[in-house]
Image (spheres, rainbow, N blue to C red):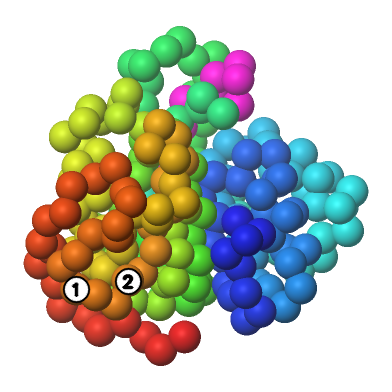
């Protein structure tokens, strides 16, 4: 994350964990803003303490579940290992259920205008960005969870991002669950050196903004 951030960037982080990534991002010189969305209400105080210990004063934290559209509060399943908590109840046992506000991506992108997106939401990424205007983004760093939605779900995510002008970075290790997607200017071509095959993508219909 620190390697791709530039002066003037605005990082939207979906899934803040304990505040480590947002602390690193907010400490990059020239980064304009960091907005972290964390679904687990029990992590809010820990994130704020991580920020305090690292002298972070420019980041903003909101408790909410990342959703394609804003709506009613949703059920969030809390597990003993915080990184395993999610919106789905079936993959492993959970300790309790919290009602958490929804954070709609459509409204959030219009409000915050991010240039970089970090996403680690335990499977909630499938379908999350399908209807969102991503033309203001330069990079996406996303942890994918095919164990939740299968290889077909992963294919849908990759093809959706490809249609919107993002291709996997050659810097991403093929066996890593954390993928980096970069906006590319060459339409319909995969970046050389990726583990994914070359294939055409249908343009999404919006021209990318100038950075």
Vertical relation: 172 (above or below) 56: above
Is 78 within the magenta?
yes
Residue at label 2? 184
Determine contact: label 1, label 2, CB under 8 Å.
Answer: no
User: Residue 6, located in which quarter of the rendered image?
Assistant: bottom right
Q: CA distance from mark 1 to mark 2?
A: 7 Å
Task: List the single residue furthest toward the top.
Answer: 93
The residue at which mark 1 appears reads as: 187
Residue occupying the point 58% across, 36% down: 40
Is residue 156 in sight in this rendering? yes
Please give the name of the residue rendered at 89% of the width and 48% of the height, measured from the top-left corner. 53
Q: Position of residue 80 (x, y in %)?
A: 61, 16
The residue positioned 80% from the left and 52% from the top of the image is 51
Seen in the picture, residue 134 relative to 52 is either above or below; the reply is below
- Can residue 101 be seen from the camera position used here? no
Q: Was residue 75 drawn as part of the magenta stretch in this picture?
A: yes
| Residue 153 appears left or right of 69 | left
Relative placement, left or right, of 57 versus 208 is right
- Which element is circle 1 on? loop
Relative depth, front residue between 109 and 3: 3
> Picture coordinates of residue 181 (x, y %)?
38, 57
Question: How would you rate the neighbour count of disc 2 (Cα within 10 Å): few for under 14, some for 14-19, many for 20 or more?
Answer: many
Front residue of 208 and 190: 190
Say which quadrant the N terminus sits in.
bottom right
Q: Residue at x 32, y 71 (%)?
A: 184
Label 1 crowding class (10 Å Cα cut-off): few <14, some 14-19, many 20+? some
- Mark number displayed over residue 73: none
The magenta segment is 73-82
Q: Residue furthest bottom?
A: 210
Q: Residue furthest front?
A: 193
Q: Position of residue 205 (x, y in %)?
A: 15, 78
């Amino acid at each position: 994350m620190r390697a791709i951030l530039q002066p003037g960037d605005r990082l939207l982080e979906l899934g803040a964990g304990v505040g480590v990534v947002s602390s690193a991002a907010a400490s990059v010189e020239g980064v304009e803003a960091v907005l972290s969305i964390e679904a687990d209400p029990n992590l809010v105080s820990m994130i704020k303490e991580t920020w305090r210990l690292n002298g972070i004063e420019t980041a903003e934290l909101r408790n909410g579940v990342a959703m394609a559209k804003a709506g009613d509060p949703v059920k969030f399943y809390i597990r003993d290992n915080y990184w395993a908590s999610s919106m789905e109840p079936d993959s492993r046992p959970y300790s309790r259920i919290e009602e958490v506000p929804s954070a709609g991506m459509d409204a959030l992108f219009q409000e915050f205008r991010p240039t970089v997106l970090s996403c680690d939401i335990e499977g909630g990424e499938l379908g999350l960005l399908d209807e969102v205007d991503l033309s203001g983004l330069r990079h996406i760093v996303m942890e994918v969870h095919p164990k939740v939605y299968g290889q077909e779900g992963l294919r849908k995510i990759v093809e959706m991002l490809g249609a919107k002008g993002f291709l996997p970075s050659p810097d991403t290790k093929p066996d890593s669950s954390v993928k980096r997607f970069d906006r590319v200017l060459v339409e319909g071509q995969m970046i050389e050196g990726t583990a994914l095959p070359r294939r055409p993508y249908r343009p999404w219909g919006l021209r990318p903004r100038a950075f």
